[in-house]
Amino acid sequence: MEDETVVNDCTNQPSSAKSDSLLQWSKWQLIDSILPTGGFAHSFGLEAAMQSRIVSHPEDLQTYVIHVLENTGSLLLPFVYTATTSPDLQTWQQLDMILDATLTNEISRKASVSQGSALMRVSSSVFVEIPSLKMMRSASLSNGDVRFHHAPIFGLVCGLLGFDSETSQRAYMFITMRDIISAATRLNLVGPLGAAVLQHQVTFVAEELLKKWKNRGVDEACQTSPLLDTVQGCHSYLFSRLFCS
């Protein structure tokens, strides 16, 4: 009798509790490294920074990661935030157009388009409970008006999944930190254990940067580290390279 009561309690959970639980699974899947969006093909200019001796030691790496996160917060979080709060086709296309004009660095622009296109393709195939994702992608591909930049698409997917704006912005900061530290590991700048320690240490700074730059409109988007933009622009001139950017 007691077991039957337990079963009934589990099956009669409020629908909001069930949806919240499913939302957590979607959030973890979206930031999981197994999601094939191509993030690990990019080093955020770290490879070029190493070859130009801007980053030579693990101590330099921590500073570089923090600067990348600051630049991500100031430049890209406004697009994530706006797309999350207004996840519709018109807003997304407008944000995509603005970001394409904002990114003057051809290397970072191509990286953004590459990852964004992959994220849109994967999301429309994985999150089938949101048919509007596939319809938006098909309509945009047929019109050819959208470049598929990563930050607006990430915000769009988060908004359609039902994430709140702060969660989507924190998740975007996390995947940026995850990808650049992963690149540092493959460049032998830091070992796997050192990378895990570094990620934990930078987390506290990343949270402060999130609080500083979150919930801003795209009219406030700006570059805070122009040197990073310049270094990343030199990536295509490297004689040998492991990453695409």
Image (spheres, rainbow, N blue to C red):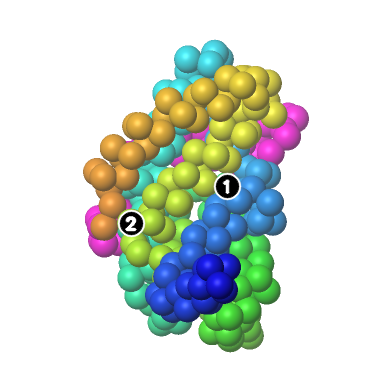
> What is the quadrant of the C terminus in the image?
top right
Label 2's element?
Answer: helix
Q: Is residue 102 visible?
A: no
Q: Amino acid at mark 1?
A: Ile
> What is the quadrant of the N terminus in the image?
bottom right
Residue, far front? 1
Taking depth in this image into account, of 83 and 5 the one nearest to the observer is: 5
Q: Amino acid at mark 2?
A: Glu
Label 1's element?
Answer: helix
Measured Cα–Cα span from mark 1 to mark 2: 28 Å
Q: Residue at x 34, y 32 (%)?
A: 205
Q: Residues within 10 Å of mark 2 (few under 14, many from 20)?
A: some
Taking depth in this image into account, of 127 and 51 the one nearest to the observer is: 127
Q: Which residues are magenta?
A: 216-245
| Mark 1 lies on residue | 107
| Mark 2 lies on residue | 166
Q: How many marks?
A: 2
Badge nearest the viewer, 1 or 2: 2
In-image side of 233 versus 38 (left or right): left
Q: Residues within 10 Å of mark 1 (few under 14, many from 20)?
A: some
> On screen, 215 above or below 5?
above
